[in-house]
């Protein structure tokens, strides 16, 4: 066992759980027999940035091929350097991952938030670096829903001030008259996992539930036994309690503000265990002062830790320090789930609960692997064949592949298109990088099979020029070029290709072959596509070559009258996969 080295002064003394896990070295004795050394699996390094449940650390300890270290309370340059030493990291809310934290990072592949909210991770910066960001949405669902109800009941029955009165030696029952929740109406904004759990509990408390969610349909609302409204403002006059279960976005920030105070049912009690900032702080204070609000219960704040707020000292409030997921069960679940997400991604490529890229389970990954390969090769090919500035890309998926989630295939194509232009373009960040360069991407799906069970066709245009190409998988994972600039053919899609546009006249193929033969360059395979069935039109040829093509040979080839355009296209060798895929 090798101890994890950590020079950080803010790291607690090392324990067993801080050790780097490696395969133990067994002693051996001298012998005349040959010694066979075991095969060592590649080690994936995982950084634990916040305290997580011991069960999560135990899982790391028990998993072969994993090293890990615990480094908590990192920030600034120390955090930046640490992130570049590991393949994956798990964190809670104690660390903030900024663009500066990831600057120059070439190693980190995945960040997992042990919890739901990922506000403390700059997702565009992570995506730009090709880092998958995942969360654990199910782990703290029940705990958060229960805390919502605990806050609502404490608010309704004045639990906190009544307890404080006893601490101070007072017995004043009349001062803490409460209200029952049965028969009341609760409004829920956000009907995801937590919102639905809250709705279930509200119905058990004999409450009427009104819900708003932009994706909630009438049929879903009926099955959940809730009343759906079109806007949040629509529910405000009809509800006695309001709880929110959404992320903090530009659309949800300040959801309840000064304007909404004039629309609420007088005495509305509001609860927030989701994200600070969804309610406007000043509006809450004014609502309590004017009596528009009958109570405010907060577990989250716009800036945390928060120890100074006028709300803390106002009557009719119940505030806790971000305890929604603070149960032993929830912390165990999010730690174990988060570690599983990291290990599965690093070992198998499985992506689940990602907030910045399409999810990809092992079965889907295996189904799409061949198409990831040809999408990437198509990107490489059309970039070289076009050879100029590109401002528009059109992808068409046809046949069986059109029914798949093709977002990851979009990224694979974009990675190939940008590979010679942008450093570290991969299946996570490439579509973002493409759009950042002002290139428009459109995607179409057609379930008709055509000549192949599945195919991918792409057209790229810009600088007054447009080229197109199509590919399919033949036999046992054999990528083939099936279309180039509208000409149908069947060519290898690997290695060094000589691609040339020409007039379909007698002798053209022989002349090209002669030049390559005279220069000692072997042609491994040849494919030609031409316009129509009659000779004399335009055609295109693709030759797979075994050797380098000097500039002098290219000049000889271009001197052939019938050739109008020719290029050498460099693609990965047969079976070779990009680093992000292998």
Image: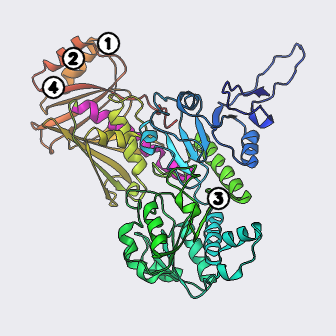
Element type at mark 1: loop
- In magenta stretch: residue 362: yes
Whole-angstrom CA distance, mark 1 to mark 3, is: 74 Å
259 relative to 132 in the view: left or right: left
Element type at mark 2: helix
Q: What residue appears at the point 45 percent right and 71 percent down from the top-left corner?
A: 287
Front label number (1 vs 3): 3
Report x, y in % for residue 101: 50, 34
Q: What residue appears at the point 40 percent right and 34 percent down from the top-left corner?
A: 425
CA neighbours of label 1 inside 10 A, class few (<14), some (14 to 19), many (20+): few
User: Which quadrant would residue 513 be assigned to in this image?
Assistant: top left
Counting residues from the start of the chain, the first of labels 4 and 1 encountered is 4
Element type at mark 4: loop
Task: Pick the residue in front: 97 or 271.
Answer: 271
Whole-angstrom CA distance, mark 2 to mark 4, is: 18 Å
What residue span does the magenta drawing correspond to? 360-386
Q: Which mark is residue 554?
A: 2
383 relative to 103 in the view: left or right: left
- In magenta stretch: residue 269: no
Whole-angstrom CA distance, mark 4 to mark 3, is: 80 Å
Q: Most extreme residue toward the bottom, as rendered?
A: 183
Front label number (2 vs 3): 3
Whole-angstrom CA distance, mark 2 to mark 3, is: 70 Å
Q: Which residue is mark 1?
A: 520
Task: Pick the residue in front: 405 or 131.
Answer: 131
Q: Is residue 32 above or below residue 121?
A: above
Task: Pick the residue in front: 88 or 80.
Answer: 80
Counting residues from the start of the chain, the first of labels 1 and 3 encountered is 3
Counting residues from the start of the chain, the first of labels 2 and 1 encountered is 1
Q: How is the image coloured?
A: rainbow
Q: Is residue 258 above or below residue 551?
A: below
């Amino acid at each position: 066992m090798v101890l994890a080295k950590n020079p950080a002064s803010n790291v607690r003394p090392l324990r067993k759980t801080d050790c780097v896990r490696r395969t133990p070295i067994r002693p051996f004795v001298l012998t005349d027999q040959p010694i066979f050394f075991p095969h060592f699996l590649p080690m994936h390094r995982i950084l634990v940035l916040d305290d997580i449940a011991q069960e999560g650390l135990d899982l790391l300890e028990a998993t072969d091929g994993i090293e890990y270290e615990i480094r908590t309370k990192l920030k600034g340059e120390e955090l930046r350097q640490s992130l570049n030493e590991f393949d994956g990291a798990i964190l809670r809310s104690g660390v903030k991952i900024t663009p500066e934290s990831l600057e120059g990072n070439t190693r980190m592949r995945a960040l997992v938030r042990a919890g739901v909210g990922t506000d403390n991770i700059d997702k565009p910066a992570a995506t730009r670096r090709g880092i998958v960001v995942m969360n654990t949405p199910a782990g703290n669902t029940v705990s958060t829903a229960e805390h919502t109800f605990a806050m609502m009941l404490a608010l309704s029955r004045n639990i906190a001030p009544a307890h404080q009165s006893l601490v101070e030696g007072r017995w004043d029952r009349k001062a803490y008259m409460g209200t029952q929740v049965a028969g009341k109406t609760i409004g829920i904004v956000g009907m995801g996992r937590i919102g639905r759990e809250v709705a279930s509990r509200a119905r058990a408390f004999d409450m009427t539930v009104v819900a708003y969610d932009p994706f909630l349909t009438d049929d879903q609302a009926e099955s959940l036994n809730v009343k759906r409204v079109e806007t949040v403002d629509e529910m405000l006059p009809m509800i006695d309690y309001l709880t929110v279960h959404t992320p903090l976005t530009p659309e949800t920030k300040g959801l309840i503000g000064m304007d909404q105070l004039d629309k609420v049912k007088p005495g509305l009690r509001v609860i927030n265990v989701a994200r600070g900032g969804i309610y406007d702080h000043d509006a809450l204070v004014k609502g309590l002062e004017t009596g528009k609000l009958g109570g405010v219960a907060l577990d989250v704040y716009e800036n945390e830790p928060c120890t100074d707020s006028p709300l803390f000292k106002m009557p009719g409030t119940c505030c806790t320090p971000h305890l929604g997921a603070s149960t032993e069960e929830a912390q165990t679940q999010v730690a174990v789930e988060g570690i599983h997400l990291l290990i599965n991604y690093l070992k198998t490529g499985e992506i689940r609960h990602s907030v910045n890229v399409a999810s990809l389970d092992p079965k889907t990954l295996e189904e799409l692997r061949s198409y990831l390969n040809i999408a990437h090769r198509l990107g490489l090919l059309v970039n070289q064949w076009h050879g100029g500035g590109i401002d528009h890309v059109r992808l068409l998926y046809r046949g069986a592949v059109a029914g798949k989630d093709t977002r990851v295939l979009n990224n694979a194509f974009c990675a190939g298109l940008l590979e010679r232009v942008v450093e570290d373009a991969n299946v996570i960040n490439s579509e973002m990088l493409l759009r950042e360069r002002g290139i428009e991407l459109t995607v179409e799906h057609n379930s008709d099979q055509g000549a192949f069970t599945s195919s991918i066709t792409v057209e790229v245009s810009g600088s007054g020029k447009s080229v197109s190409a199509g590919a399919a998988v033949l036999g046992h994972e054999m990528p083939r070029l099936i279309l180039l600039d509208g000409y149908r053919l069947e060519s290898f899609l690997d290695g060094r290709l000589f691609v040339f546009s020409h007039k379909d006249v007698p002798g053209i193929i022989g002349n090209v072959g002669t030049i390559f033969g005279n220069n000692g360059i072997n042609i491994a395979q040849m494919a030609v596509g031409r316009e129509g069935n009659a000779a004399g039109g335009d055609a295109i040829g693709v030759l797979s070559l075994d050797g380098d093509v000097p500039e002098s040979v290219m000049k000889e080839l271009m001197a052939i009258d019938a050739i109008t355009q020719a290029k050498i296209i460099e693609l990965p060798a047969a079976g070779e996969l990009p680093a992000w895929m292998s």
